[in-house]
C-alpha cells in the first residue's frame, strides 16, 4: 500500500503488477526472468532504448502511465531513454534549503527502518542486512543504531536524483549483479536488493554526518549514471540519474543523526510506503 503525505491511499501501475505476478508466480515465468535479467540482455535493451526507433514507445507509455507532462520539459526526444531521463520544469521540484531539514533525494515511495546490530530488514517479503548491500562489514557497522531509508522509484517517476545537503563525497563503488525488478511483487520470491547491480558512495554532509547513498538498478536498467567521482556538492545539485526501468535509492544514516517525520515512521511501521517528491522535507537533523 502507498499513501500520500496527506494520508490518501493511491494505486499505481496495476497492469505492471499483473504482468509481474504472472512472471514470478510460475516456473516458466521465472525461467524467462532468469534470461531477461542477465546483464547482456539488459545492455542490449539499453542500446535499443538509446536508439531513434525507441521513440515509438514514448506516446503509448505516457498514455498508459498517465504521466502529467506539464511537470516536465517536453521536447523532440532523440530516444526513449532521452524521454525517460527528462527534466522537470524549473520550480516543479522546489528544494527545502533549511539547514536542519532532511530532504528526499528523489521522487519515490519511501519507507524508514531503524538499524540495529545484525538486524535483518524484511520489506514486502525480502530479507537483507546492510552488509549485504555494501559487501563491507566495517562500513555497515558504523551505521548501527541509525536509519535505513528506502526510496523506491516506479517507471513513471522522475528518475533524476539530487544531493540532500552540502558536503563532499568519496569515489563511487560499483557492485555487479543480476538486474531484477524492485516491484514489491518480486520481493516475494527474490532477495532483490542483494542480487541487483548497485553503486554506493559515502557522503560527508554538513548537517547529517556521514551518509551512505546506494543506487540500486532494476530489471532492464543496465546503467546507473552518477555525475561525480570524488567531489564537493551542494544541496539540491543533481547527483545522477537512472536510465530505463524502476529503481531504488537506499540511504544509511548514523545513530542520532536524524529524526524522521512522524507520518513516514507510522506508515513504515504498518508496512505502508509514503509518496515523496525530490527536495521535500522528510525529517530533521538529530539533536
Image (cartoon, helix red, strand yellow):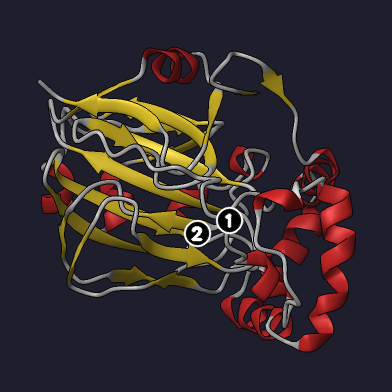
CA distance separating discs 2 and 1: 9 Å
The answer to whether 134 appears left or right of 159 in the picture is left
Dot 2: what SS?
strand
**Badge 2 or badge 1: first in the primary sequence:** 1
**Residue 149 place in picture, x, y as percent:** 36, 36
Is residue 163 positioned above or below 257 on the image?
A: below
Tell me which residue sits at (82%, 38%) in the image: 14
Name the side, left or right, on which 203 lies relative to 215.
left
Residue of label 1? 88
If the image is split into quadrants, where does the N terminus sit? top right
Can I make out residue 28 in this image?
A: yes
Q: Say if mark 2 contacts mark 1, CB within 8 Å.
A: yes
Q: Count neighbours of disc 1 (C-alpha within 10 A) and say few if under 14, some if 14 to 19, many if 20 or more.
A: some
- 28 over 171 or under it: above or below: above
Image x and y of residue 52, in percent:
78, 87
Classify mark 2: residues with Cα within 10 Å, few (<14), some (14-19) or many (20+). many
Residue 75: name its quadrant: bottom right
Identify which residue is drawn at 49% across, 16% down: 267
Does residue 147 show up? no
Residue 41 locus on image (x, y percent): 67, 79
Viewer-side label of 2, 1: 1
Q: Residue at x 83, y 85 (%)?
A: 53
Residue 160 got which mark?
2
Task: Specify whether 226 is left or right of 177.
Answer: left
Amino acid at each position: 500500500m502507498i499513501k500520500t503525505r496527506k494520508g490518501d491511499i493511491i494505486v499505481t501501475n496495476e497492469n505492471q503488477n499483473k504482468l509481474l505476478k504472472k512472471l514470478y508466480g510460475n516456473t516458466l515465468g521465472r525461467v524467462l526472468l532468469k534470461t531477461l535479467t542477465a546483464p547482456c540482455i539488459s545492455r542490449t535493451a539499453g542500446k535499443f532504448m538509446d536508439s531513434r526507433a525507441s521513440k515509438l514507445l514514448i506516446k503509448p507509455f505516457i498514455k498508459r502511465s498517465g504521466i502529467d507532462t506539464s511537470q516536465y520539459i517536453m521536447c523532440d526526444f532523440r530516444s526513449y531513454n532521452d524521454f525517460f531521463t527528462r527534466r522537470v520544469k524549473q520550480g516543479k521540484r522546489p528544494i527545502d534549503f533549511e539547514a536542519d531539514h532532511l530532504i528526499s533525494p528523489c521522487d519515490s515511495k519511501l519507507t524508514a527502518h531503524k538499524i540495529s546490530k545484525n538486524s535483518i530488514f524484511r520489506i514486502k517479503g525480502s530479507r537483507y542486512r546492510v552488509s549485504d548491500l555494501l559487501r563491507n562489514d566495517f562500513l555497515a557497522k558504523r551505521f548501527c543504531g541509525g536509519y535505513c531509508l528506502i526510496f523506491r522509484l516506479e517507471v513513471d517517476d522522475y528518475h533524476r536524483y539530487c544531493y540532500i545537503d552540502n558536503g563532499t563525497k568519496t569515489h563511487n563503488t560499483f557492485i555487479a549483479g543480476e538486474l531484477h525488478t524492485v516491484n514489491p511483487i518480486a520481493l516475494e520470491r527474490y532477495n532483490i536488493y542483494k542480487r541487483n547491480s548497485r553503486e554506493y558512495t559515502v557522503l560527508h554532509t554538513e548537517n547529517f554526518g556521514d551518509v551512505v547513498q546506494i543506487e540500486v538498478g532494476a530489471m532492464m536498467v543496465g546503467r546507473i549514471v552518477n555525475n561525480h567521482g570524488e567531489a564537493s556538492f551542494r544541496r539540491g545539485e543533481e547527483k545522477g540519474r537512472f536510465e530505463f526501468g524502476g529503481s531504488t535509492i537506499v540511504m544509511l544514516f548514523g545513530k542520532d543523526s536524524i529524526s524522521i517525520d512522524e507520518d513516514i515512521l507510522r506508515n513504515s511501521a504498518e508496512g505502508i510506503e509514503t509518496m515523496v517528491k525530490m527536495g521535500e522535507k522528510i525529517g530533521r537533523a538529530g539533536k
